[in-house]
Amino acid sequence: MAKRYEIRFSGAGGQGLITAGIILAEAAAIIEGKFAAQSQSYGPEARGGASKSEVIISDAPIDYPKATIVDACLAMTQESADKYANGIKPGGVLLLDTDFVKNEPKGDFKIYKMPITRTAKEDLGREIVANVVALGAMIALTGVVSREAGEKAVLAKVPAAFLDLNKKAYNLGFEKIKAQM
Amino acid sequence: MSYDYDKWLRPGKLPHIWCPGCGHGIVMKGLIRALDICGLEKKNTAIVSGIGCASRLPGYIDANTLHTAHGRAAAFATGVKMAKPEMTVICCGGDGDGTAIGGNHFIHACRRNIDMTYVLMNNHIYGMTGGQFSPCTPTGAKASTTPYGNPDPIFDISKLAIGAGATFVARTTAFHATQIDKLIAEGIKHKGMAIIEVVDDCPTTYGRRNKFRSVIDMMKVLKETAVPVAAAAKMTADQLEGKILTGVLYKEDKPEYCEQYAKVIAKAQGA
Amino acid sequence: MAKKVALIQGNTACALGAVYAGCNFFGGYPITPSTEVAEVLSEELPKVGGKFMQMEDEIAAMASIIGASLAGAKALTATSGPGVSLKQELIGYACIAEVPCVIINVMRGGPSTGMPTGPGQSDVQQAKWGTHGDHATIALVPASIQEIFTETVRAFNLAEKYRMPVQVLFDEIVGHMREPITFPEPGELEIINRTAPTVAPKDYKPYDTSFGDVPPLAAFGSEYRFHVTGLNKAQDGFPTTKAEYVDAEERRQVRKVESPENAAAIESNEEYLCDDAEVVVFAYGSTSRSARYAVNELRKEGIKAGLFRPITLWPFPEKRISALGKQAKAIVVPEMNLGQMILEVERVTKGTCAVAGVNRVDGDPLNPGEIMKKVKEVM
């Protein structure tokens, strides 16, 4: 039976969650040659408002392209943490951005915490790469694609002038979570 | 001097559908003379219309002719022109077609300044459906849907066209038959959107309801209310009350749309 | 050489499929969730010498593609919900005047403004009956990003071959989701262009049936001059009210799509595990993906379920559904609407099996569990 892995990136519009989902799907489909489907939902606001991006990765063609019950979830707002915590598989993982999520949801999943946005702002000087920090962390947590494939996908996506910044962001997120595991 | 209209008329399509006394036939003859003045080739000429009495005109002309849906002439014509910019594209139609249901297409074709010529026959009424008021029916006039007199203000089509960005705007009347061909020809030669408003008469559905005893009466009004722009310049506002200005009302050189788009293509192709 | 693979949205696949098919004119108007089709074409068309027009409204967009097509272009528009409603007037014009063109409808919730960013499948009967008057309809319903590309190409081919508007309907889910696509090489997919006239220009009639039910179409600006109207017309293209001409033309225009042999050539279906199926799930577009998932799960539980997936929705696959209605105990029809294509399934099966709908109109996709539950109910 095909192994199907579901990941959800949730938070607010403007946090780059859709881009993070796309990069993960590209790492899986284009670099590792797996099957992947990325979808999203968003409100009418371009910034703020709820936003989520879902990635399904499988070794067989993907029928239902939306998440059913996810293996891993990222929540970058309190609202999304509260809303999506109960959509995680028993034994799954939830990564919280502690800059925005103060109350931990309860459930049969393992919680990892990281000040994602602050890490981007203080360690890298650019809040805008918080999504890439989060992506590195999610790839470290799930192992759904290799560290190298994730990095390659990030670098293929960003403008030349920001290669170094994004490489640092990705690896910082990856290592900070690895240290907790 | 006799003029050979047959060279631009489709054989076997006459008689036309227009009523005796209708000015549309005068406009069609003017258009044919203009096509001739411009030396156009039939294969490279497209005439596009909407719906209504005036919009039946293309069917009689031996060219590429497109009788579209109500109000949509300018939008269809834009597609034709963009696909084959080398063609001469002429729109024709009435006031209701062009400025009510087709008003949005009309103003945006003007705004783009795409190289087309729009001959708009303004007879102040929806003739084909039996005489309902249009955006160009004078306030107070009778139509089949204004039994108590028209409460609506009117559009001044030429002003509308100038305001919307057309770069050649001219007006004449069905009485001034010899001016029609000259203005249309000038419009065709102009690079950009040319609007030729021909103030026209509908004896059957407008004249009859508004106390015109004959077509002659209607023609007399067209003759008497028309004031050439040069003469108007010397007249006072009081003297111009109720008059319509005729001749070339506006002309300007501005970038034409197809040429602008050719630059887009060049840029996209890395030129 | 390895083929080019990319992870792209359905809307992007549609735009790139159009370019592959030889589209060289797009007329559109911004509307969610179809806008990316226009955005991609605004970049891609001028690269190949094509024209992209953002028109003043949806009606003008439809008008412009008909005009461009008559001047010889392969023309496309893309829209959603309210835009599709506005285009109906001129979809009818393209039907009666027999002008090849392609209309993309990325379906959202409705009626009216409805739910612009949510998926729906509630335009599928509108695709058939949206414009007034009797007319034939070809509508395609791709279910994946790869298929959006190939079906957009096929839509152009059908439009050109049958000289008519062809609609491609997919919903917001496949329009906006990203999947890997393998781009066909140039020449790999068949490209059909309209049949040009061969008679002398003076003998040309734009609706000349001596060449069959699909008359050759000349282009404005060629040696062939002709007249086009939205009125009922005779074979020479000029308006007529003569009963025998009107009747013959109306019937021909429907027959060119709906005659058994033409319909069979236009139909395209996928059957999955239908051979021994006791319950057939009839599903199209993104809903068919949930249905396939459900069918696989049901098979694991020992239930003989199968999936019938129309890729051509109109003309409706009458013969196959009629046959499956005799074979199966039930046909389950999941749709993101309140029951539209189920009416066709019921019409065609004529009571030979149970027919049950699974419907959802809240902006969320139908999930496999909902379909499985209904299948078990009807068993």
Image: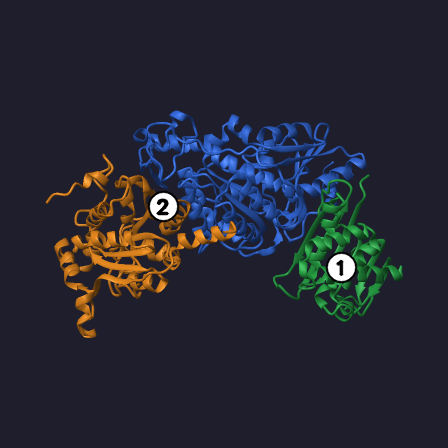
Chain colours: A green, B orange, C blue
- Residue C337 seen by the camera: no
| Disc 2, SS | loop
Count of labels shown? 2
**Residue identified by numbered label 1:** A167
**Mark 1: which amino acid?**
Lys
Amino acid carrying mark 2 in the image: Glu
Residue occupying the far left of the picture: B1
Q: Who's the residue at 67% across and 63% down the image?
A: A13
Residue C181 falls in which quadrant of the image?
Answer: top right
Q: Is residue B91 above or below residue C294?
A: below
Q: Nearer the viewer, residue A68 or A169?
A: A169
Q: Is residue A156 visible?
A: yes
Label 2 marks a residue whose chain is: B
Residue farthest to the front, as pictured: B271
Relative to C213, does residue B171 appear above or below in the rendering?
A: below
How crowded pointer 2 is (Cα within 10 Å; few <14, some 14-19, many 20+) is rated as few
Taking the spot 51% from the left edge, 33% from the top edge, the residue there is C192
Q: Chain of mark 1?
A: A
Give whichever of C52, C115 is nearer the camera.
Answer: C52
Please indicate whether residue B245 sits to the left or right of residue A36 in the image.
left
Q: Which mark is residue B86?
A: 2
